[in-house]
Amino acid sequence: MSFLDLAKKRFSVRNYQARPVEEEKLMQVLEAGRVAPSAVNYQPVHFIVVRNEEIKKKVASTYKRDWLLTAPVIIVVCGDHSRSWRRGDGKDHCDIDAAIAIDHMTLAAVELGLGTCWICAFNSMECHKILGLPSHIEVIALLPLGYPGQEADTERHQTQRKPLDELVSWDKY
């Protein structure tokens, strides 16, 4: 499958099959996050794999949608702001580095027949407390992982995405 086909096949899965994710596939998804580039190669990301049902329920309670509990795995993506690179004007690249890692993991999941949904609308501070994280670690996103309960509509990009001429400028804005 070409990269573009793979990217088009990825979608936000909000319904998962009651089927566990094989350890080998989970490790491949995590490896995709590990090899993702980061600013100055500081690698400020950390992944917490949640499979324990009690902990999953607690983490899922920070997000107000019940479907999250259908995922057999939740990868909690964290950033270590004490280790991230800052540009000359002070901009912290931790969130950008985490986003790159998440994107690598979402695409690796699709290649393996799995699905994900990038979740940012959750109570990060509560999740931080539940997981007992130190103050310099931020919970950036929740990434449920499992076998999708539905198929992607690969044609949706024709009608639900802006055309290139609205996104691209040549030589100047």
Image (cartoon, rainbow, N blue to C red):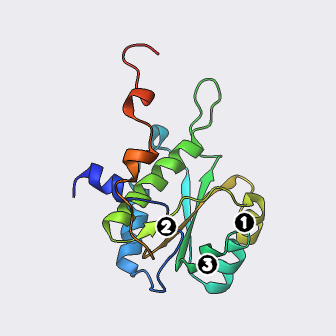
Residue at the disc numbered 1: 127
Q: Amino acid at mark 1?
A: Cys
Disc 1 from disc 2: Cα separation = 21 Å
**Residue visible at 66% across and 75% down?**
66
**Residue visible at 61% across and 73% down?**
68
Q: Earlier in the sequence, mark 1 or mark 2?
A: 2
Q: Nearer the viewer, residue 169 or 130?
A: 169
Would you call the spot at circle 2 few (<14 residues within 10 Å), some (14-19), or many (20 or more)?
A: many
Would you call the spot at circle 3 few (<14 residues within 10 Å), some (14-19), or many (20 or more)?
A: some
Q: Amino acid at mark 3?
A: Leu
Q: Nearer the viewer, mark 1 or mark 3?
A: 3
**Are the two marked residues, 1 and 3, in contact with CB atoms closer than 8 angstroms?**
no
Residue at the disc numbered 3: 69
Instruction: In the rendered view, tell whether residue 12 sits above or below residue 151.
Output: above
Q: Secondary structure at mark 2?
A: loop
Query: Which of the 4 image quadrants contains residue 131?
Result: bottom right
Residue at the disc numbered 2: 13
Q: Amino acid at mark 2?
A: Val
- Position in image of residue 100 (x %, y %): 46, 48
